[in-house]
Image: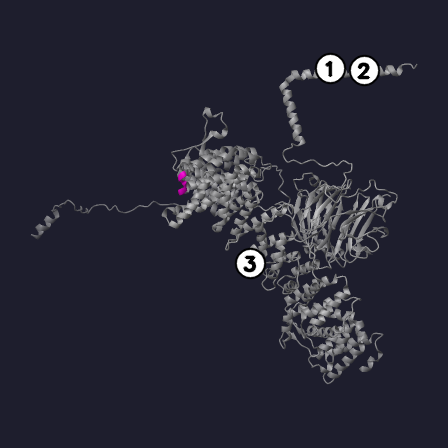
Amino acid sequence: MTKKRKRQDDFQKVKLKVGKKKPRLENATVTNFKTKSIHLPEQLKEDGTLPTNNRKLNIKDLLSQMHHYNAGVKQSALLGLKDLLSQYPFIIDAHLSNILNEVAAVFTDKDANVRLAAVQLLQFLAPKIRAEQISPFFPLVSAHLSSAMTHITEGIQEDSLKVLDILLEQYPALITGRSSILLKNFVELISHQQLSKGLVNRDRSQSWILSVNPNRRLTSQQWRLKVLVRLSKFLQALADGSSRLRESEGLQEQKENPHATSNFIFINWKEHANDQQHIQVYENGGSQPNVSSQFRLRYLVGGLGAVDEGLSSPENLKGFIEIIIPLLIECWIEAVPPQLAASVGNGIEREPLQVMQQVLNIISLLWKLSKQHDETHKLESWLRKNYLTDFKHHFMSHFPYALKEITKHRRKETNKSMKNCTILSNNVDHLLLNLTLSDIMVSLANTSTLQKDSSWIEMIRKFVTETLEDGSGLNNKQLNRLLGVSWRLMQIQPNREASEALIKAVYTLYQQRGLLLPVRTLLLKFFSKIYQKEELRPYRLRYRSKLLSRWLAGLPLQLAHLGSRNPELSTQLIDIIHTAAARANKELLKSLQATSLRIYDPQEGAVVVLPAESQHRLVQLVYFLPSLPADLLSRLSRCCIMGRLSSNLATMLIGILYMRSSFSGWKYSVKDWLSEVDYFSFLFSTLTGFSKEELTWLQSLRGVPHVVQTQLSPVLLYLTDLDQFLHHWDVTEAVCHSLLVIPARSQSFDILQSAISKHLVALTVIPDSTAGCIFGVICKLLDHTCVVSESLLPFLASCCYTLLYFLLTLEKGEPEHLKKRDKLWGACVSILALLPRVLRLMLQSLRVNRVGPDELPVVGQLLRLLLQHAPLRTHMLTNAILVQQIIKNITTMKSGGVQEQWLTDLHYCFSVYITGHPQGPAALSTVY
Amino acid sequence: MAAPMEVAVCTDSTAQLWTCVVWELHSGANLLTYRGGQAGPRGLALLNGEYLLAAQLGKNYISVWELQRKDQLQQKIMCPGPVTCVTTAPNGLYVLAGIAENIYLWEVCTGNLLVILSRHYQDVSCLKFTGDSSHFISGSKDCLVLAWSLCSVLQVDPSRIPAPRHVWSHHTLPVTDVHCGFGGPLARVATSSLDQTVKLWEISSGELLLSVLFDVAVMAVTMDLAEHHMFCGGSDGSIFQVNLCARPAQREQSFQPEQEPGKVFRGHRNQVTCLSVSTDGSVLLSGSHDETVRLWDVQSKQCVRTVTLKGPVTNAAIVLAPVSMLSSDARPSLPLPRFNKHLLGAEHGDEPRRGGLTLRLGLHQQGSEPSYLGRLEQMQAVMCSTLEKGGQDQLRVRVSELEDEVRNLRKINRDLFDFSTHIITRPGK
């Protein structure tokens, strides 16, 4: 039964039921494997001669593939080329001509992917090729570009704009050189010429109308926007290229010649005197031959083609304006249809707004270009005649709308309505749009036409004033425009009240805290420009704007407040202050005088915390201060000696004060000279190098390593740092010179020595630099007319001994003090030579019996050195008996011990220089 | 006299014995002295080789001497304020004076005060003319240097204020001296300032060519005629020589540094106030506040001669001696008129109008008046157009008319000739 059943199983009929899956057959072939093709990314063939890319294709292969009929091959060739060139950049140089040939040719390829690859390749190549390199091939590239721009296929036209973008980015000078063709292409991209016969007789500006192509992927407005963006970029490049000075528009400084600052030779006398710098004054000056000449054999980067005038001639510019402006106005109308004008108060979409913005941008650029060639304002009047009415009709009828829109928006903002979110994001654009429009319109007006234009000018003025007054959120670009418009408004309107209102608006903006540096800079520039313009007028016609003078008078205080927080801003402030001070502006000088104590504070005043360049200007500003009271002078002297002004600047300051003093003979216009008493006390405190407080503090120092003490002299020496010492020494040079040139020598010497005996003689601790400097000054000032006072001499003698003691005990281990040695030694020796009585007093003070054993060798060495010094020899001879006595004392003191080397030397020197001398006392030999 | 003699003209500020002394450059012999008043710095000028002008120190007038009558003061030019500096045009037609912050311009032949320029903001410190009198340069204590074109200054246009051709504002402290080089409108101008720099400018382009920074304030500057060297007098008494045409030194030369005499003239003990170079560029004259005038040999930088005066030197200049200075019988070609104190045009009732013709340049109207060249072209165009329009016929008619005219004239001439010969040859009765 089982067998039977089994057999039945074999032949059992499989019942297929509806809804159940059919079981798989046993002999069915499994087909669920996947196949993969074999990639051969690299060729096996290796060519040793030329570098290859990953696919082992060299440049020749790739370039030849560009002619392949298959788009895929072409695309891969372009990608491969990019790959190859990124690996081996040197190929670019070698094959630039071929590469550009082929790449430019596929700008007009039918396949979108190929064009995309070509654009990418160009994007990659452009930063690597310099303008000079590409300039010979540029005619070719631009020819392909313009053929792409004028191509019948829309896709190619669109992609051509991308190419244009890249070229504009990298080679603005080259591409603007081809402007005449490209501008025509631009026009053709968005419009077409009407060739119907009825229109031939009408003027050519009417013959272009905007074209609408329904087949395009984009809406025609989007497309126009794209083209307009490029056109404005292109014009921007054109304007940048041709304008010589690329400063912020509308706020150009009134420099006499922008080139003058650029290339003059700057020589430092010291280097010139050392034959390190040489001067060659060329015909046109400057360190390089001047290339600003109008004459040009051919364009420097323009290739070999014929000179392309583009928009540089007024006629061409006029022609282009005639074509483009009607088109732009059409674009504008399309963006803001007049019938909708009533409802635009609710705000407009982003897209039309952008179109409007571009339209205005282009017009403003055209205006800018026209101004560059417009010397006689002919073009301006032409523009005014042709377009003012149009603009007034189309643009200005919307202008209050913009204003209304903003106010409305503000009101709605309080309601927090959702609808305004989009407008909020556009708000900034609105502002710039309005400003651009005002800019365009204002530049059409001038003083003579003010009456006729008063309606819309008043509108603009109101807008500008309001924007300025709540202008906290303005960015740099907007403010620049805004100030440009206000400047122009002030220029065309001689009316005092009107400009005063504008100044007031700017001033309120200026007074706000927390403005960014560029914004602050712009405002400063604006004010200084107004100020300079005012200054140009003759006295009678000049009116003083109260706000302007208040602004000016506030500057010194701002400078003092600013401290070291913002050096750049400080520099600008100092520049303006300097100019106004040089022009003897009364308000400024008054406030400068008032804040001078803060500015010239030696601790945290601007003069010490700012960088060196500003310090230089501030020091020069001292010259213009109306009066220099004693407390200011004491601060200045502290500034000099504290070392935070470099010694050069300190010297300059002393020189300026000399000029201000009555001794210079330089006629100073202000009545009050620097008083002589103040001048002398300034010089003396600078000479001392330490303030009174510091000196009294020093008196309490004892037994510190910085204080040198001897048993023979009451004066102790305080050792200063080397930096301070050298600085002090340099400043002393300048002080010396100022004292030297005072005509009554003996009187100035008297003043000096009375000051020394009053302030220094009583001290016991003297800084070494002070002692050295006083010696130096006395040496320089002393001549036969001067009488040295008795009270001074003992002080000088003890100072001198202490200094000499310090010099002789100086160890090799102190390199810092070693550098002082020569200077101090020179000062000591020269004062001993000049004043023999000081030498005598010093020798008298050498009472050797009071000296400990460790100081004795020093005294011996000192005597030996003094004997050896030639200028002192005669004086030593006159004091021979004294010297002899000292030596005798030393010998007796040392008699107990072994005869030391220094004593032997001393005896030798004495015998040579004094005993050996014919006039020397003969009895000396008996001593030994 | 074979060659014009060079003399040194010096003044000091005390003027005990004389105001101005003239001495022979090489021998040091005193030639002449002029008496009367004290001349201020930059206040001495020779006018036309016939008169000597000296601005008085702190006083309201300019003294004028005839060069050969040295003892007699010819005229005092009264001014509205203390005169800070004076200069004259090399062609002798104009006198410029700086009075406070204004520049006064007189015409010498009439004595009229033509114009007062007030573009400076503080006292004018120095004035210089270019060699051809076409431009002048003014430096002031407001740190500005202005270059003026004389023609544009002289144009009568009451509505327009004369503007300088260039404003040079690179100095940061008062300008102390100006020197104008050779070459008229193409000249280079050196300016010195208390800000320790000397700057060299070009009048034609208005560009700054060179700036040299020193360690001390510079009080005086001059150049030699060939403009090879620039000499700068410092406030510490040194005179610095800047080589304007130096070539980089050969390396071999550095082995004998002691042969180079250096680039500094040392000797003055106080600030140098004035500098002047002789025509051949070999001798430098310097005056200083240490009351000496020194003569230097430029080549070796040695002091050749020292003349001690009685006070700080205010002016020292080397000039080519005019004839009238040396020969006593020379007389000025024209008497000096009285210089007016008031601006011409601003009429004062008490001033009688003297007979005389005043020529002033006409209005320079911008743009509206076509240039002569333009007018010529226009006329040419008109002529051409008429010729073309009229064609050949009109031309022929015109030619024949002219020929007739010529024939007629010939006939008249012949008649006249016949008539006169007839009268002359007629036998007398």
The residue marked by circle 3 belongs to what chain?
A
Amino acid type at image mark 3: Leu
Q: Is residue A423 left or right of residue A674?
A: left
Q: Is A344 contained in the magenta span?
A: yes
Residue sitting farthest toward the front: B349
Which quarter of the image is occupied by the C terminus of chain A?
Answer: bottom right
Residue where numbered disc 2 is placed = B414
The residue at the point 85 percent across, 75 percent down is: A919
Disc 3, SS? helix
The residue marked by circle 2 belongs to what chain?
B
Instruction: Report the predominant secondary structure element of the magenta stretch.
Output: helix
Q: Which residues are magenta?
A: A342-347
Q: CA distance from mark 1 to mark 3?
A: 94 Å
Amino acid type at image mark 1: Asp
Q: Is residue A545 left or right of residue A874?
A: left
Q: Is residue A153 left or right of residue A442?
A: left
Residue sitting farthest toward the right: B429
Residue where numbered disc 3 is placed = A562
x and y percentages locating residue A122 in the rendered image = 47, 42
**Toward which corner of the image does residue A161 lie, by quadrant?**
top left
Q: Is A430 contained in the magenta span?
A: no
Whether residue A412 is visible, yes or no, is: yes
**Toward which corner of the image does residue A222 lie, by quadrant?**
top left
The residue at the point 76 percent across, 82 percent down is: A889
- Crowding at dot 1, Cα within 10 Å, few <14 / some 14-19 / many 20+, comes out as few
Residue where numbered disc 1 is placed = B404
Q: CA distance from mark 1 to mark 2?
A: 15 Å
Disc 2, SS? helix
Whether residue A308 is visible, yes or no, is: no
